[in-house]
C-alpha cells in the first residue's frame, strides 16, 4: 500500500522508530552530560574546600609562630631591662640598705611608708577629705611593732583609716597562717567599724575558689563564735 506522497506505511513506521530512538539517545546523552558536570563540580568544590582549609591552617600556624616570637622578644627585652636596672649603683645601694634593716629588725621595709603611723602622718599633711589610709593585716604583721588589734584601737577613732584588709603575713587567706584574727574582728566590732573588710591573699591555697571559701567560712565562724560568747 502506498500513500499519496509515494511512501509506504512500512517506511513511515521505520522512520518513526528511527526518530524515537534518536530522541531517546539524545535524552540519554543529556543525562550523562549533566551527571559528568555534577561530578566535576563536586570534585572541584572538594578541592576548593581542601585548599581553603590548608591555607587557613597555614596562616594560623604562621600567626601563632609570629605571636610566640613576639612574646619571646618582649620577655627577652624585659629581662635585659631588669638586668640593667639591678646593676645600677642606686638599686644596689637600696638593696643593701633593705637587707641590713631586715637583718637588724627582722621586719621587711620599703622606702616610702612602712607603718600606719607614717601613713596617717601623710594623710594629715595632705589634708584632703577624699584621702584616707588603711590597715593591711599582712603588711602590719611584717612591719609593725604592736598587734593589729592594737593598731585598730588606736587609729580607727582618728577617722584616718577607711579600709581594712585581712590576710596572713604568710600571704595566704585568714586562718591559713599564724596570725589570730579573732582579736582583730573583736577590735573592729569594739570600734563600730562600718567600712569594707576585704580578703586579700596572694598565695591561693588550694586555689582561688578554695581560698575564698576557706576565708569566708573561717571569718564567719569567728563572728558567730564571738556572738555566742557575748
Image (spheres, rainbow, N blue to C red):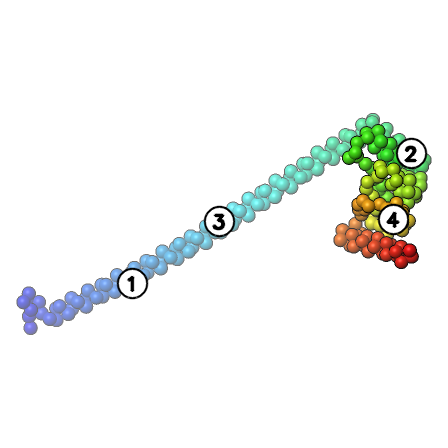
Q: Position of residue 201 (x, y in %)?
A: 80, 47
> Which is more foreground, mark 3 or mark 4?
4
The residue at 94%/37% (across/down) is 105
Specify the quadrant that holds the C terminus: bottom right
Q: Nearer the viewer, residue 103 or 47?
A: 103
Q: Is residue 35 left or right of residue 11?
A: right
Q: What's the CA distance linking mark 2 and mark 1?
A: 100 Å
Residue 214, label in figure: none
Q: Secondary structure at mark 2?
A: helix
First along the sequence among labels 1 and 3: 1
First along the sequence among labels 4 and 2: 2
Q: Nearer the viewer, residue 230 or 182?
A: 230
The residue at 42%/52% (across/down) is 44
For label 1, count other residues whose C-alpha is less than 10 Å away and answer few (under 14), some (14-19) or many (20+).
few
The residue singled out by tag 2 in the image is 101
Specify the quadrant that holds the N terminus: bottom left
Q: Position of residue 78 (x, y in %)?
A: 72, 35
Residue 189, label in figure: 4
The residue singled out by tag 3 in the image is 51
The residue singled out by tag 1 in the image is 28
Q: Measured along the vertical axis of the image, is residue 17 above or below residue 150?
A: below
Q: What's the CA distance linking mark 4 and mark 1?
A: 97 Å
Q: Nearer the viewer, residue 148 or 187?
A: 187
For label 2, count other residues whose C-alpha is less than 10 Å away and answer few (under 14), some (14-19) or many (20+).
some
Q: What's the CA distance linking mark 3 and mark 4?
A: 71 Å
First along the sequence among labels 2 and 1: 1
Amino acid at each position: 500500500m502506498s500513500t499519496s506522497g509515494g511512501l509506504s506505511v512500512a517506511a513511515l513506521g521505520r522512520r518513526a522508530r528511527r526518530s524515537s530512538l534518536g530522541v531517546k539517545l539524545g535524552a540519554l546523552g543529556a543525562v550523562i552530560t549533566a551527571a559528568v558536570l555534577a561530578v566535576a563540580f563536586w570534585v572541584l568544590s572538594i578541592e576548593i574546600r581542601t585548599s581553603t582549609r590548608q591555607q587557613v591552617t597555614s596562616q594560623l600556624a604562621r600567626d601563632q609562630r609570629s605571636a610566640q616570637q613576639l612574646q619571646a622578644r618582649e620577655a627577652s627585652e624585659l629581662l635585659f631591662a631588669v638586668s640593667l636596672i639591678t646593676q645600677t649603683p642606686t638599686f644596689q645601694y637600696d638593696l643593701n640598705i633593705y637587707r641590713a634593716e631586715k637583718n637588724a629588725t627582722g621586719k621587711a621595709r620599703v622606702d616610702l611608708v612602712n607603718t600606719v603611723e607614717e601613713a596617717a602622718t601623710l594623710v594629715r599633711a595632705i589634708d584632703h577629705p577624699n584621702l584616707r589610709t588603711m590597715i593591711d593585716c599582712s603588711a602590719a604583721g611584717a612591719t609593725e611593732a604592736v598587734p593589729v588589734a592594737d593598731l585598730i584601737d588606736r587609729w580607727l577613732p582618728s577617722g584616718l583609716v577607711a579600709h581594712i584588709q585581712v590576710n596572713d603575713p604568710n600571704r595566704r587567706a585568714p586562718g591559713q597562717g599564724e596570725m589570730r584574727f579573732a582579736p582583730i574582728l573583736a577590735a573592729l566590732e569594739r570600734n563600730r567599724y562600718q567600712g569594707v573588710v576585704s580578703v586579700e591573699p596572694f598565695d591561693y591555697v588550694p586555689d582561688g575558689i578554695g581560698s575564698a571559701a576557706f576565708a569566708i567560712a573561717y571569718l564567719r565562724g569567728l563572728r558567730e563564735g564571738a556572738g555566742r560568747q557575748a
